[in-house]
């Protein structure tokens, strides 16, 4: 009789997350270990006393599942936009791993990919919406033209299909389709932001990054855009990262949140629990400020 144990099946299950980061870091200036010393919340600064380098973000790790929204909150300069820019590929992280479920078997560090491969990912796998519509749109081009951009970049050629897709997207973000052929510069701030969202959704990316999507808009206009985003995040299976200094935005859009201070994550948890019972003194301060 054989006593050999039966080997367990070797097929690994696909990741449950859409986006994962581990040990993500970005240093402006000398990237050596000396730059880390004396930086972070315990020292009240992200600037290295030894080298003058800015440790904008360090050791940032999280997972976001399809259909989930994760918030990153912190004051100006805490490093939240840096994390987003590193994931988007707008700049290169100094350290760590960024993985997407749709790339390889989820073990590929997209930081290691060539610039061409990163650009392709940016068109098909990761979209970003920035605070400033001019960062995501060409204001001198029509709404339809802006939305057509990512479509043609991945090979759409049929004019009628592109216009139909642009019209669908404009309807989805509640911009009158009749404005499709107007330059975005003629749009109000809220409408520009809606067009930026439409463009970001054009290629149905699995990951959406939102960097202060409503900061700078009038309160009532911001409320409308937030409402739209909330519905879009609920309806699509998209995994979203929402960067904001405003707990109101984070509360409305996200299920989990990371709190960043001086480039480090000081607390993370379920958004409603963290708002209810913040543990870290910095989180307590942010929550108290949000409550007025
Ligand atoms: N290109 C750069 N060169 C040097 N330092 C930079 C650069 N970009 C950002 N920083 C610094 O990195 C730190 C983190 O900046 P980051 O923009 O990520 O903060 P933030 O939390 O998003 O703030 P804000 O909401 O004001 O954008 C800050 O100290 C900032 O001054």
Image (tube, grey):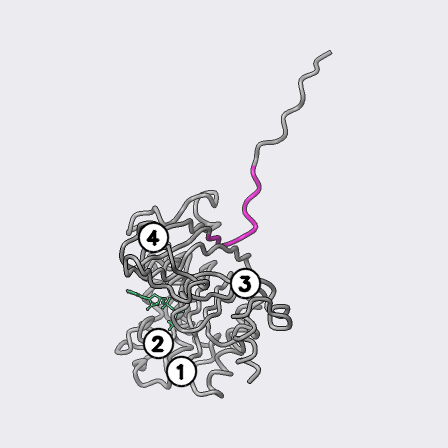
Cα distance in 3D space between marks 1 and 2: 8 Å
- Badge 2 element: loop
Q: Residue at x 52, y 70 (%)?
A: 282
Cα distance in 3D space between marks 1 and 4: 30 Å
- Badge 3 element: strand
Chief secondary structure of the magenta portion: loop
Q: Is residue 240 left or right of residue 87?
A: right
Cα distance in 3D space between marks 3 and 4: 22 Å
- Badge 1 element: loop
Tell me where the magenta segment starts and ends, as one range.
12-21
Q: Look at mark 3 in the image and give the residue it sits on.
A: 267
Q: Which residue is at the far right? A: 1
Quadrant of the frame with the C terminus: bottom right
Ligand 1 image position (quadrant): bottom left
Please name which of the two marks, 3 or 2, marks the residue nearer to the observer. Answer: 3
Give neighbour class at mark 2: few <14, some 14-19, many 20+ (Cα, 10 Å): some
Cα distance in 3D space between marks 3 and 1: 27 Å
Please name which of the two marks, 3 or 4, marks the residue nearer to the observer. Answer: 3
User: Which of the two labelled residues, at mark 3 and mark 2, occupies the earlier sequence position?
Assistant: 2
Quadrant of the frame with the N terminus: top right
Please name which of the two marks, 3 or 1, marks the residue nearer to the observer. Answer: 3
Could you say where residue 190 lies in the image, as x and y percent from the top left? 42, 83
Q: Look at mark 4 in the image and give the residue it sits on.
A: 94
Cα distance in 3D space between marks 2 and 4: 25 Å
Q: Verify CB contact (< 8 Å) between mark 3 and mark 2.
A: no
217 up-or-down from 19: above or below: below
């Amino acid at each position: 009789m054989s006593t050999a144990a039966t080997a367990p099946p070797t097929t690994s299950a696909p990741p449950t997350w859409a986006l994962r980061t581990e040990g993500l870091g970005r240093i402006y200036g000398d990237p050596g270990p000396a730059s880390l010393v004396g930086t972070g919340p315990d020292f009240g600064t992200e600037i290295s006393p030894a080298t003058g380098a800015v440790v904008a973000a360090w050791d940032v790790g999280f997972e976001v599942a399809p259909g989930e929204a994760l918030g990153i909150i912190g004051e100006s300069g805490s490093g939240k936009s840096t994390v987003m820019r590193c994931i988007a590929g707008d700049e290169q992280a100094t350290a760590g791993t960024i993985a997407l479920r749709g790339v390889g078997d989820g073990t590929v560090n997209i930081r290691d990919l060539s610039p061409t491969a990163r650009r392709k990912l940016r068109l098909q796998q990761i979209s970003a919406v920035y605070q400033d519509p001019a960062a995501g749109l060409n204001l001198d081009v029509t709404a339809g033209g802006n939305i057509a951009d990512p479509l043609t970049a991945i090979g759409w050629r049929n004019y009628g299909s592109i216009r139909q897709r642009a019209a669908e997207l404009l309807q989805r973000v509640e911009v009158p389709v009749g404005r499709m052929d107007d330059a975005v510069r003629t749009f109000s701030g809220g409408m520009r932001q809606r067009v930026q969202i439409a463009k970001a959704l054009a290629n149905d990316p699995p990951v959406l990054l939102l960097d202060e999507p409503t900061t700078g808009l009038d309160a009532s206009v911001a409320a409308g855009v937030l409402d739209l985003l909330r519905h879009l995040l609920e309806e699509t299976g998209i995994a979203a990262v929402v960067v904001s200094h405003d707990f109101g935005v984070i509360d409305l859009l996200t299920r989990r949140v990371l709190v960043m201070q001086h480039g480090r994550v000081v607390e993370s948890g379920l958004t409603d629990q963290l708002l209810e019972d913040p543990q870290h003194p910095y989180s307590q301060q942010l929550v108290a400020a949000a409550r007025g």
